[in-house]
Image: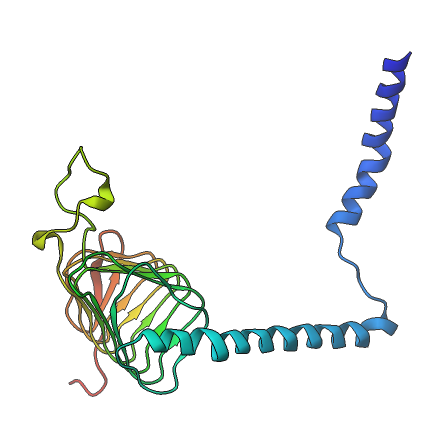
């Protein structure tokens, strides 16, 4: 009889209670017309509080702390969050630089790695730089979120007797990366060692670039290929 009672109770929960619970969970509260000004004011209050909190973190914490670690920097720099760094790195910033969200800078050698960033550069959230020697971003470069740029493969020859982090990159595994002026990098792009991206080139989202491309190129795919050339203004 107890089993029959539990079965009946489970049927009741499934047929009567569950539909009501789903409606409650999946349907948002729609405020009546009389309360809409109140909810609008609450929205504005929430937005203002969020913006103030982000301003405080950017202006009073992240930017001054990061600039203190830079060898050289210009003016009007905005760093949303303190960059994640794993080791010392020589960093130089130009004017009007913006780190949007979290940016990761991971020096992976003891060869005085350098990250050089020009004027008017935008770097999107969760972009990662693996720097063994030199990564250079020219003026007015923009990098979409989740991108990865590395001037090294990260390790040298495989040694089965050592963990990977104890096998440093050799000379053959390191080559500088350069993004010339005006390069635009889409989201989720990967730029590997030794690549030079010509001025004003555009990398489509998700591109994986293993070889250098000339200026005014549109690059797409994995591996990235030049699919079109941009005609600069004023060209015949």
Q: Which residue is drawn at the image coordinates 86% and 67% (left, top)?
A: 32
149 displayed left or right of 63: left
In the image as oriented, which residue stretches furthest toward the top? 1
* Quadrant of the rendered image containing residue 73: bottom left
Q: Dividing the image into 4 quarters, which one contains the C terminus?
A: bottom left
- Between 104 and 46, which is closer to the camera in this rendering? 104
- Between 208 and 86, which is closer to the camera in this rendering? 86
* Quadrant of the rendered image containing residue 144: bottom left
186 displayed left or right of 157: right
Spot occupied by residue 79 in the image (x, y as percentages of width and height) = 42, 74
Q: Which residue is drawn at the image coordinates 84% and 31% (left, top)?
A: 13
Q: Which residue is drawn at the image coordinates 36% and 78% (left, top)?
A: 67
Spot occupied by residue 132 in the image (x, y as percentages of width and height) = 19, 60
Q: Dividing the image into 4 quarters, which one contains the N terminus?
A: top right
Q: Is 14 located above or below residue 23 in the figure? A: above
Spot occupied by residue 155 in the image (x, y as percentages of width and height) = 18, 48
144 displayed left or right of 181: right
- Between 48 and 107, which is closer to the camera in this rendering? 107
Spot occupied by residue 53 in the image (x, y as percentages of width and height) = 58, 74
- Between 102 and 7, which is closer to the camera in this rendering? 102
Q: Is 98 located above or below residue 164 in the figure? A: below
């Amino acid at each position: 009889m107890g089993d029959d009672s539990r079965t009946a109770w489970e049927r009741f929960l499934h047929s009567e209670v569950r539909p009501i619970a789903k409606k409650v969970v999946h349907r948002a509260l729609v405020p009546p017309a009389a309360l809409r000004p109140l909810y609008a004011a609450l929205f504005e209050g929430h937005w203002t509080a969020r913006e103030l909190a982000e301003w405080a973190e950017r202006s009073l914490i992240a930017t001054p702390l990061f600039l203190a670690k830079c060898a050289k920097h210009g003016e009007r720099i905005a760093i949303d969050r303190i960059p994640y760094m794993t080791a010392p790195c020589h960093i130089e910033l130009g004017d009007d630089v913006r780190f949007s969200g979290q940016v990761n800078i991971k020096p992976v050698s003891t060869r005085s790695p350098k990250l050089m960033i020009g004027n008017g550069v935008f770097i999107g959230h969760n972009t990662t730089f693996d720097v063994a020697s030199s990564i250079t971003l020219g003026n007015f470069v923009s990098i979409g979120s989740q991108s990865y740029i590395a001037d090294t493969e990260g390790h040298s020859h495989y040694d089965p007797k050592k963990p990977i982090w104890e096998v440093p990159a050799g000379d053959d595994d390191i080559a500088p990366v350069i993004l010339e002026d005006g390069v635009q990098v889409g989201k989720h792009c990967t730029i590997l060692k030794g690549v030079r991206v010509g001025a004003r080139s555009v990398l489509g989202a998700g591109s994986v670039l293993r070889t250098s491309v000339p200026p005014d190129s549109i690059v797409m795919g994995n591996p990235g290929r030049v699919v079109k050339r941009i005609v600069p203004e004023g060209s015949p």
